[in-house]
Amino acid sequence: MANKELTQMLNTLRRSLPRPLQLHSTAKAAMSMSDEQIYACSALACQLAEQGNTIDAKDLLVGLSVIDPENTFVHSCLAALYMRMEEKDLAAGEFLYTLQLNPQDIAATTNLAELYFENGNLEEAKKYLDKSILLDETGENPFANRAKALKELLVNLEKEK
């Protein structure tokens, strides 16, 4: 979601709150939610999704993304859920937004590369696979290792052409 649209949505939400809550600079502050509570709710949403309750998981994560719009974990979880729901455009948008907030996010980089790969956009896939591999300085990140495997597959596919 573009920053301008997100800002407009947050301002609309803030104006709809009772006057004492409008005085806070963020929806997160107005609702008095701590980072721990945001992460706990995100974990609950992930559990709901794993149990097959994707609608409630999505609703919870979308709500959290409005409450804490700069929380990369929430956006990455939402993007992964969209991937699972086969909502590839929404997933790509959330991963791109996550990377706008945190360009070092290996999971988002790898997942975005996978989306591009699945959609046949091999140049973009290769770009993000390379980035993911470079971000993993220790060579132990499971997402970067998945990127290495995908990159190898991509190279083999190119050789076969």
Image (cartoon, rainbow, N blue to C red):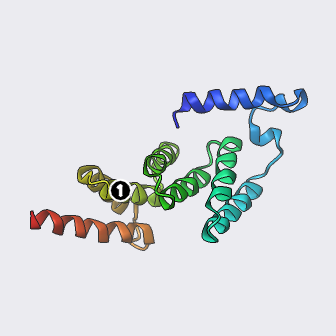
User: Which residue, as the protein is rendered here, is positioned at the far right?
Assistant: 20
**Which of the 4 image quarters holds residue 120?**
bottom left
Residue that badge 1 annotates? 113
**Residue 113 percent coordinates (x, y):** 35, 56
How many labels, in total? Answer: 1
**Residue 157 percent coordinates (x, y):** 17, 66
Residue 156 seen anywhere in this rendered image of the structure: yes
Which residue is rendered at x = 71% and y = 64% of the image?
Answer: 44
- Compared with 149, 64 (above or below) is above
Question: Residue 133 versus residue 116: which sits nearer the camera?
Answer: 116
Quarter of the figure that contains the C terminus: bottom left
Which residue is rendered at x = 42% and y = 59% of the image?
Answer: 111
For residue 138, side relative to residue 2 (left or right): left
**Residue 131 percent coordinates (x, y):** 34, 55
Q: Residues within 10 Å of mark 1 (few under 14, many from 20)?
A: many
For residue 112, side relative to residue 130 (left or right): right
**Which of the 4 image quarters holds residue 149?**
bottom left
Residue 141 seen anywhere in this rendered image of the structure: no
- Compared with 83, 31 (above or below) is above
Amino acid type at mark 1? Ala
**Residue 105 percent coordinates (x, y):** 48, 55
Question: Residue 86 versus residue 5: which sits nearer the camera?
Answer: 86
- Compared with 120, 68 (above or below) is above
Which residue is rendered at x = 88% and y = 26% of the image?
Answer: 19
Q: Secondary structure at mark 1?
A: helix
Which residue is rendered at x = 29% and y = 52% of the image?
Answer: 127
